[in-house]
Amino acid sequence: MRLKNLELNGFKSFSKKTVLEFQNSIVSIVGPNGSGKSNVVEALRFVLGEQSIKSMRGSSGSDLIFKGSKNLPKSSRASVTIYFNNSDKVFKLINGAGENINLNYETISISREVYSDGLNKYILNGSEVRLRDINNLLSSVNIGSSHHHIISQGEADRILNASSKDRREMVEDALGLKIFQYKIKEAQRKLERTTDNMKEVSLLRRENAPHLNFLKKQVDKFEKAKEMQITLLSFYQEYLKKESVYLEKEQFFLLKEKEKISSELENIKEKISSVEEVSTREESEKEKELKILEKKVYEIRGIKSEIERKLGRIEGMMEVEEKRKETKIPESVVLISEEKVKTIFNEINDFINEAINKEDLSDIKNILLHIKDILKELLPKVSIEDSSQNLNSILNPELELLKKNQQEILTEMQNIKEEENKIIENIDILKREINQDNEDIYLKEKERFNLRVKYQELTSALELILIKERNLLKEMESFENEIKEGSVLIGIEILSYKDFVIEENIDRSIQEELKRKIERIKIKLEDVGLGGGAEVIKEFQEVSERDNFLAKEMEDLSKSIEALRVLMADLKEKIDIEFKEGIKKINIEFSNFFSLMFGGGEGYLSIVTENKRKKNDDESNTEEGENIVFEQGIEINVSLPHKKVKELNALSGGERSLTSIALLFAMSQVNPPPFLVLDETDAALDEANSRKYGDMLEKLSHHSQLIVVTHNRETMSRAGILYGVTVGSDGASKLLSVKLDEAAAIAK
């Protein structure tokens, strides 16, 4: 037995707690009209989630609460609880992931409470739940929201009057496919929510995109700036280290050079002073003596010239005299013409003048030796050999006198020459001394000049050193400023240049190139700007994480949408397959029950497809704005025995009742629910059909518990337990129960 108990408290006419136990496969509820027996059926509808108050003969939720009587107060709430046996753990719930989970309870209790303000509560095993959870739970045991398992008085004909689409829903409910419909609806709701969420997420991403792009550009700039800072640091380390080493070496070098040059300048100053004192003290005396001697030579040479002129005249006179006398001169005597003598004396005179103008003693000596050679060549020619006649005996007295004068003049010339030679020799000596002195003076002057040049060079070098020192100070200031600027752009890490290792040789051209690179990077960094970089990066990370989260959400939502669509397609396919298989099974049972009820004939269900036009929400009311929707429905086909009636509208009331009962029973046989409630469905049957109806009840009871509300004695006789409903003196409904097996035994 699946259904165990039904507990009513304050529901409609049941003011007090009333419990019905279902310990038999067929339980019959009987009682006079107005006693409240149909309220039991409505209590079942109520607790199983019925939402139509009208179907429970009320207009609002408060109409389901006991109104009170003369002797009993009205109730503040109405509650109904139903208990099911779940020893085989067949009841299931759908979790958030869409999976069916078996409830690990031996007994499942479902309660529904309604208050005077219309508030409803659903309680599952003591925990408040949603109506959807109740529907999902009941669908797992083929108790659907269409209540095909509860057939009330006057509603048996509902399946015949229903549209083909509504019939399909009833059949699906009977086949236990409603749970799949719930899953599809749940998937649709999730799909709608997911689509809405996806739109919201997409909107958020679109809203964040401009700000994120802006932050991304800023971060890219800062990242680029970071890279430039790293590059700048590497350049700075090499540049500053080389620059510091260069400045230290340059400072040390300039200091040494300055000390060296200053020392050399002092030494050269002393040397210049000493050289100038010596040269000015010894320079004038020898030059004065040389001038006196040169003056004497000049005077002697004047005398010589006068003597030479006299000698020339005498020689001329002698030549004239010789020609005049035409005295024959011996062969040993060579006569020289006056013209020849003049020529010789002029030649000698020219050599003497040349010697006078010469300052070099060696040149003067050569000239005198040349004159001596001329005289040596001349004297033998005017002398007479020892073996020849005496010239005096040959020449006349006048010629002799001339020769004597000539000899005297020659002697005087010789003396003058000797004196000249001595003076010239003294001049040569003096000149050599003067030349030596001049050479010494020249050397000293050269030395003084060189010293002055060197002094000037050293002075210029010292001035250059001072200029270099000033430039070096500027470079050192620039070096310090560079460190300060670098610390602003890089930070204290710039001081790491001190630990940088470099080669010994420092190429200034490479330094200049490094400097240019550093300046270019500094300009770029200044253009980028580093203010607020950490905050921008932090904000970018937050916005980026948010965007990545939203992107992941979009991806997850997209996957969820795809999964939901696949699930819906699979569920629809499964419903379609099982629906068609269920129709086949229902047709077999329907045909059997129909033949049993009518003594022959045939009844079956057929699937029909209807075309309906559905307007699109975003289109105008035109044919272009309409879609054709194909909907499947169920048609009931009957063929009565001995009649040609095949249309439902042509059936009589009894025939319609029998047809609907046969169909409902057939549906229940294919996928039996835990229980069936039949509320006076046999009211229109005659005695013969009542027996057939009773036979069907017994057949149905093998698969489902039957709760039958009836006035029919045949139907009552098939029940195991009878509940009698009466109205007590207090105006509330009461129950009396009879177990027919025990009653029959007592009656015997």
Image: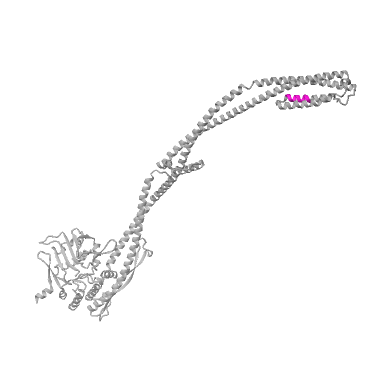
Indicate whether 605 appears above or below 731.
Answer: below
* Residue 349 magenta: yes
In percent of width and height, residue 483 lies at 43, 39
**Which of the pair 455/201 is nearer the observer?**
455
Which one is nearer the viewer's eye here, 113 or 477? 477
Which of the 4 image quadrants contains residue 296?
top right
Q: Main secondary structure of the magenta part?
A: helix
Residue at (87% x, 18% y) in the render: 398
Q: How is the image coloured?
A: one colour
Number of numbered discs present?
0
Choose top left, top right, bottom left or bottom right for residue 43.
bottom left
Q: Is residue 320 left or right of residue 598?
A: right
Q: Quadrant of the N terminus?
A: bottom left
Relative to 290, is 590 above or below? below
Q: Position of residue 587 (x, y in %)?
A: 27, 75
Task: Determine if the magenta segment contains residue 171.
Answer: no
- Residue 145 visible? The answer is no
Q: Is residue 173 visible?
A: yes
Question: Where's residue 192, x and y in %?
Answer: 32, 60
Q: Does 176 sit left or right of 734 as displayed?
A: right
Q: Which residues are magenta?
A: 347-356
Q: Residue at x 66, y 25 (%)?
A: 435
Q: Residue furthest front?
A: 387
Going by the image, does 426 lie left or right of 246?
Answer: right
**Which is more toward the observer, 623 or 55?**
55
In the image, residue 276 above or below residue 39:
above
Along the viewing direction, whichever of 336 and 736 lies nearer the viewer: 336
Farthest bottom residue?
642
As drawn, 335 above or below 171: above
Query: Percent from the top left, x then y, of residue 690?
Result: 18, 76
**Left or right position of 620 against 143:** right
Q: Quadrant of the C terminus?
A: bottom left
